Amino acid sequence: MPFAPKLAAVQTAAVVYCEGNFAGLDGKTAHGLVRFCEAFKIRAIVDSQSAGIDAGLLLDGISKAIPIVADLGKALALPGSPPTTFIYGMAPADGLYGKDDRRVLMQAMAAGLNLVSGMREYLNDDPEFALAAMRHGVSIRDVRRPPALKDLRLFNGSIATARCIRIAVLGTDGAIGKRTTATILVQALNASGIHAVLVSTGQTGLIQGGRYGIPLDAIPSQFCSGEVEAAVVEAFCTEHPAVIVVEGQGALSHPAYLSSSFILRGSQPQAVLLQHAPARRQLSDFPFMPMPTPASEIRLIESFAATRVIGLTLNHEGMNDAQISAAIALYAAELAIPVTDAVSRDPAALVAMVVRAFPELGSSKNGQL
């Protein structure tokens, strides 16, 4: 019997701010919220450069009935239940707000909206924002704020108690679709009757309503492996799933985004799915650095950790359908592992990847080992 996801009892209506970036890589938080969100009912995206288009159509060619509007005023004027939350939907490399961002966030609070943000700047620590929140009777949630130092956990070996299959979704770059693939994989496994749970490691997954996870890149490096371990163990002890999928961050080969090393050490996955963008020639935030190949990344992952890459998933940016099909065939022949595109192809292919690597899942009763 398929496992149904535990949706929030009541979804809060929200507007997502993504000015000038919904059509680009820095809009990845907004992209994730359009594709899937348990915690909020997304009413609109604010981006004057893409206004007048359905957000789902622009993103994936699938209508989501989420309009892109030019400004906050137009979002508030939309028919239906009024939003109560304003989500900052961008993820620039520096994690800092611009002057226009601050002005719009202030306008949102003045309109009575609570703020949610995953930026590295904590709005609650800004006297101007803290005072405005108090004045307007709204709240500010800084998603990326780590736990207090006294509450951070070192690696302690408890990952051995998470007696289930653990799969990390890693990538060859940042902003390449690891969270999207991980989310679709968990949904597809549950729909097929294999109980799966997602552990989020970034701000978007937590904003979407992820029940297990941490803002990994905001945690002091000494505690990163331990915090990943603790999140996975919590997910296992609470739900006893057959599979835990851990969202990756950056890439193991990346010169700046090294969170994958902590994910591999902390969660100790028995398997990895690798996400790659065939048409991407340079790293997204580092155009002076060429993209690694899937083959080189697989060698690095398998030499760094006691795990195996069981499949390759594609980000089809800059590719048409024929090119996607050609890339799937090419990489499958070159790497001798299954290859698919989680967004444009049937999610059953993701399930097949996992069951091929772990045949016991195909015969497990009630989706549990």
Image (tube, rainbow, N blue to C red):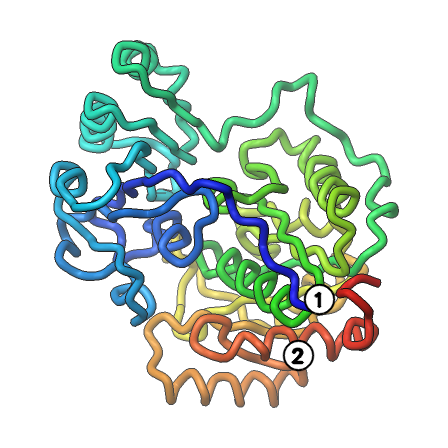
User: Relative to 147, does residue 194 appear above or below in the rendering?
Assistant: below
- Marks 2/1: CA–CA distance: 12 Å
Instruction: Return the residue nearer the eye: 41 or 285.
Output: 41
Q: Which numbered tag is attached to residue 39? A: none
Instruction: Return the residue nearer the eye: 212 or 314.
Output: 212
Q: Disc 2 or disc 1, which is closer to the eye?
A: 1
Q: Which numbered tag is attached to residue 194? A: 1
**Residue 11 place in picture, x, y as percent:** 42, 42
**Residue 204 place in picture, x, y as percent:** 46, 45
Q: How many discs appear?
A: 2
Three-letter residue code for mark 1: Ile
From the viewer's perspective, is 62 left or right of 196? left
Q: Quadrant of the C terminus?
A: bottom right
Instruction: Return the residue nearer the eye: 66 or 231.
Output: 66
Question: First in sequence: mark 2 or mark 1?
Answer: 1
Give the residue drawn at x 58%, y 44%: 201
User: Which residue carries the number 2 mark?
Assistant: 352
Q: Are marks 2 and 1 in contact (CB under 8 Å)?
A: no
From the viewer's perspective, is 32 left or right of 171? left
**Residue 156 place in picture, x, y as percent:** 84, 35
Q: Secondary structure at mark 1?
A: loop
User: Relative to 195, does residue 20 appear above or below in the rendering?
Assistant: above
Give the residue drawn at x 26%, y 67%: 57
Q: Residues within 10 Å of mark 2 (few under 14, many from 20)?
A: some
Q: Secondary structure at mark 2?
A: helix
Q: Residues within 10 Å of mark 1 (few under 14, many from 20)?
A: many
